[in-house]
């Protein structure tokens, strides 16, 4: 059996992070290795932990978005291999992530959608 996919959660909302963490804990295919609340925390954590996947809420602090974080990650050597999965309750946001090759899960995150994205991450 393959090692679980290492995930960092990035979300300013504690309740959403807790829900996502619980959803991840229902699968043996993934493990949460860290959580970030702000854009800056996310950059630091993703650079130091180098997870296979970051599940990122679209709306971040300071008017920044998960897309801004993805663009920043793609310009750094250390985090180029991190697969970003955006999340939002707004369906129109999904196209923006998919257009640039990122994953997307509509909120609230459910085990089936999470499993589908984890399969994409493992194939990448």
Image (cartoon, rainbow, N blue to C red):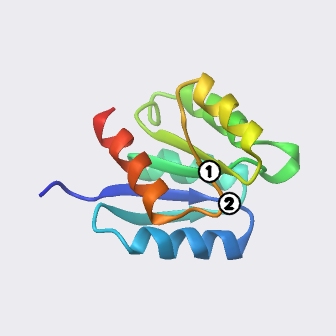
**Nearer the N terminus, badge 2 or badge 1?**
2
Tag 2 and tag 1, C-beta contact below 8 Å: yes
Q: CA distance from mark 2 to mark 1?
A: 6 Å
- With respect to residue 75, does 18 lie above or below? below
- With respect to residue 42, does 12 lie above or below? below
| 43 on left or right of 28 | right
Mark seen at residue 37: none
| 54 on left or right of 56 | left
Q: Is residue 51 visible?
A: no
Measured as percent of width and height from the top left, residue 39 is found at 71, 49
The quadrant of the image that shows the N terminus is: bottom left
Q: Which residue is mark 1?
A: 56
Could you tell me which secondary element the residue under label 1 belongs to? strand
Q: Is residue 5 visible?
A: yes
Label 1 neighbour load within 10 Å: few <14, some 14-19, many 20+? many
| 87 on left or right of 25 | right
Could you tell me which secondary element the residue under label 2 belongs to? loop
Q: Which residue is mark 2?
A: 11
* Residue at the (87%, 49%) spot, across then down: 62
Question: Of 13 and 92, which appears nearest the observer?
Answer: 92
* Residue at the (51%, 49%) spot, across then down: 54
* Residue at the (53%, 26%) spot, across then down: 101
Label 2 neighbour load within 10 Å: few <14, some 14-19, many 20+? many
């Amino acid at each position: 059996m393959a090692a679980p996919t290492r995930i960092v959660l990035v979300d300013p909302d504690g309740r959403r992070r807790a829900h996502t963490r619980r959803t991840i804990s229902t699968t043996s295919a993934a493990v949460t290795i860290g959580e970030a609340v702000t854009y800056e925390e996310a950059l630091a954590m993703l650079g130091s932990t180098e997870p296979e996947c970051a599940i990122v809420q679209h709306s971040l602090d300071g008017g920044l978005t998960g897309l801004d974080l993805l663009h920043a990650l793609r310009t750094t050597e250390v985090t180029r291999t991190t697969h970003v999965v955006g999340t939002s309750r707004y369906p129109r946001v999904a196209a923006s992530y998919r257009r640039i090759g990122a994953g997307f899960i509509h909120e609230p995150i459910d085990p089936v959608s999470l499993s589908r994205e984890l399969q994409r991450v493992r194939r990448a």
